[in-house]
Amino acid sequence: MQSRLAALDFRVCGDGSFVQDLSDLVVFQDWQLTQGQRIGWLSRGYQEPYFAAQETRVHRFHEVLNDYLAGNPPGRD
C-alpha cells in the first residue's frame, strides 16, 4: 500500500529583511538554518530524520499519523 504524506507547507521568506532585528536571540539563529534544511529535505540522499533518544515518542507519533493517513490505523489487519 502506498503511503500518503501530508502536503509540505512551504513559505518563501525572502532575505528576512521584513523580520525585526532578532540577531541576538536563538530564534533568529534557528530561522537562519531554515533555507539549508529545506534544501536538505529535497535532497535525493535524505531518507528520514534522526531523532535523539528523548524524541522517540515524537517519532512514534509520526509513524502512527502516517499509518492513519495511509488508511491503515493501528490495530487493523
Image (cartoon, grey):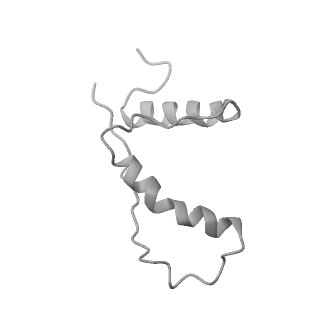
- Residue 14, image x, y percentages: 41, 77
Q: The C terminus lies in which quarter of the figure?
A: top left
Left or right of 56 in this view: 42: left
Picture quadrant where residue 15 is located: bottom left
Picture quadrant where residue 44 is located: top left
Instruction: Name the residue at 40% across, 68% down.
Output: 11
Q: Is residue 72 above or below residue 51?
A: above
- Residue 47, image x, y percentages: 39, 34
- Residue 35, image x, y percentages: 44, 62
Instruction: Name the residue at 49% across, 23% down.
Output: 74
Q: Is residue 7 above or below residue 29?
A: above
Q: The N terminus lies in which quarter of the figure?
A: top left
| Residue 69 vs residue 42, the one in the foreground | 42
Instruction: Name the residue at 36% across, 33% down.
Output: 70
Residue furthest top as drawn? 77
| Residue 68 vs residue 42, the one in the foreground | 42
User: Number of numbered discs present?
Assistant: 0
Instruction: Name the residue at 40% across, 49% down.
Output: 40
